[in-house]
Image (cartoon, coloured by chain):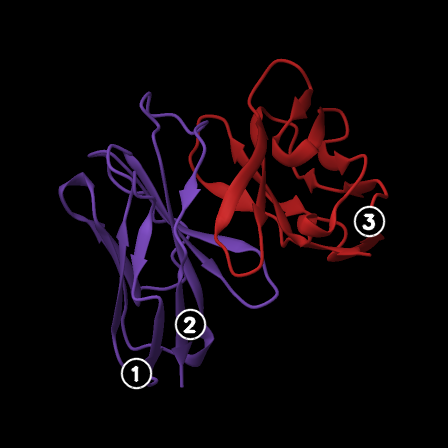
Amino acid sequence: GAGVSQSPSNKVTEKGKDVELRCDPISGHTALYWYRQSLGQGLEFLIYFQGNSAPDKSGLPSDRFSAERTGGSVSTLTIQRTQQEDSAVYLCASSLNVRGISEETQYFGPGTRLLVL
Amino acid sequence: AQSVTQLDSQVPVFEEAPVELRCNYSSSVSVYLFWYVQYPNQGLQLLLKYLSGSTLVKGINGFEAEFNKSQTSFHLRKPSVHISDTAEYFCAVIYTGGFKTIFGAGTRLFVKA
């Protein structure tokens, strides 16, 4: 009965380094979302995976950001050549979406707090 | 462009008073609407959602919201708040047929004794 888990919980990195953030969705959930929550702002949609379909990458802010989902389960968000403006909390959510539509509740992980120095 | 506007960034209110947190979205096409809550040092969790049917939706912890299609609004209400309701509340919309979830900037509800 585990929820969505994310690792690491906190990450401090130097400007220019690459970082990888991991998300383990709830078992059986076909949909997975990544969001970014900057200080004092709402959640910014980054990318969406649904089953084996091509992901919706429309929210990725630049080509330094990429994500993959292996075997329809675990997902990794990679930020290359990090910049200070990438500092934020990165949230992952999963949902059942058994009919491939978007009405299902999203269950959120605790987030990864990224600080780029 | 699709957007969600939460008109109040902070709402201070006394315990046992009623509260309304406002949310408007940018388009009148068919939508799914959600309210999520983020308690201090916790992750987001669903409070309630509107998919179809009755425009008045009841959620957890005594909250309810009303979908108003003509005003493109989905305001959240509670008749009597508790200290434990202190949290950040996010309104979100998914345009049916799509998957991208658009969140508002959040409203911080602060309940005072």
Q: Nearer the viewer, mark 1 or mark 3?
A: 3
Question: What colour do you see for chain A?
Answer: purple
Give the answer, above or below, for where B88 lies relative to A3. below
Residue hosting label 1: A16
Give the residue type that dot 2 points to.
Asp
Compare residues A15 and B91 and report the one nearer the observer.
B91
**Mark on residue B15?**
3
Taking B9 as reference, is A31 left or right?
A: left
State the SS at label 1.
loop
**Mark on residue B33?**
none
Give the residue type that dot 3 points to.
Glu
State the SS at label 3.
loop
Which residue lies at the image location 42% right of the left edge and 35% below the top edge?
B99
Taking A115 as reference, is A23 left or right?
A: left
Residue hosting label 2: A86
Which residue lies at the image location 31% right of the left edge and 23% below the top edge?
A98
- Tag 2, which chain? A
Q: Quadrant of residue A36?
A: bottom left
- Tag 3, which chain? B
Q: Residues within 10 Å of mark 2 (few under 14, many from 20)?
A: some
First of labels 1, 2 by sequence position: 1
Q: Where residue A88 appears, x then y in whole percent?
A: 46, 68
